[in-house]
Amino acid sequence: MSPASEPLHLRTLLATYPHTAPLKNGEVTSTRVALDFKDVTPVWSGFKAMVRRQEFDVSEMAIVTYLIARSYRKPMVLLPAVMTGRIQHAWAIYNGERGTLTPADLKGKRVGIRSFTTTTGAWLRGMFENDYGLDLASVRWITFEEPHVAEYVDTTDRAPEGKKILPMLFAGELDAVLGERSDDPRAKSLFGDPAAAARAWYQKHHIVPLNHMVVVSAELAKSRPDIVAEVYGLLREGKRRAPPPTDGPDTTPFGVEACRPALERIIDYAVQQRLIPRRFDVDELFDETTLNMK
């Protein structure tokens, strides 16, 4: 193969899922693009490198991190390709040895979360506020990590150095935690029966909360929109080859219109929680190339 016809190599950060495995194992390839996968575990620990230093050409990205980054004009463009989505109710727990708690009971409580800007946290707080009537300002939020976007001003209380979130919960130093699960018998769901609560929420809203999507660098989007379209085609082909959901809704939708309802909802939640300064229109999150992706 001559140098002129060699594929363009792209620094790529994607975790391994059923729909990305065909790209990683060589089952789905392109003569125009070579995805050079970087091994970063857990994948979200690489988001800071993308936001702050644009270390990747193609990167998985938590949607709330992207919204905050977009607010500060970080040079990234969103693709309507969902890597992970889930109904979040199982990820909010408390210590049952200390009594019973529900979302409405969190007023004045100490609630731990890895970072206030995590997407799981934003979805759960949105549910607490809009479905359970909790005043989020009445909660004492305890965080353990800084936001991926350096410019975001985090006004939460920081956990003491060296402390871990689940041990603090079971020691009584936190009343509840978000974004965590535990097999410890003391761990109970804030929603009681989280599976039933999740079904009820979906039946009410008909939305699967989106967690991680995909971004490309603004430089790549501007200089090679054809390559961005090629990357999206690879991602779509990977999804096509993945086993379809056996029951329940599609948790990894592709295409702007398929993602629009969940994006509108998380934008609303992000504005309510002052994670972003204004409400974006969904179309603003894309460029001329990615806005037309189906």
Image (cartoon, helix red, strand yellow):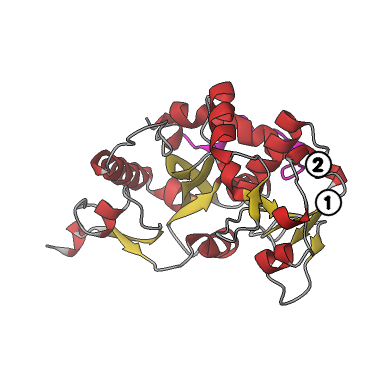
Mark 2 Cα-neighbour bin, 10 Å: few <14, some 14–19, many ≥20: few
Residue 285 is inside the magenta segment = yes
- Circle number at residue 109: 1
Tell me where the magenta segment starts and ends, as one range. Answer: 271-288
Q: Say which residue appears at 30% left-offset and 42% top-offset.
A: 239
- Name the kind of residue labelled 2 in the image: Asp
- Circle number at residue 105: 2
Q: 167 or 292, which is in the foreground?
A: 167
Q: Secondary structure at mark 2?
A: helix
Locate the C terminus by quadrant: top left
- Name the kind of residue labelled 1 in the image: Lys
Per the picture, the main secondary structure of the magenta-coloured stretch is: loop
- Residue 55 left/right relative to 173: left
Mark 1 Cα-neighbour bin, 10 Å: few <14, some 14–19, many ≥20: some
- Residue 121 left/right relative to 252: right
**Quadrant of residue 150 in the image?**
bottom right
Indicate whether 156 appears above or below 293. Answer: below
Q: Are marks 1 and 2 in contact (CB under 8 Å)?
A: yes
Q: Provide residue 274's location: percent of width, then percent of height.
A: 77, 42
Distance (Cα) linking label 1 and label 2: 8 Å
Count of residue discs? 2
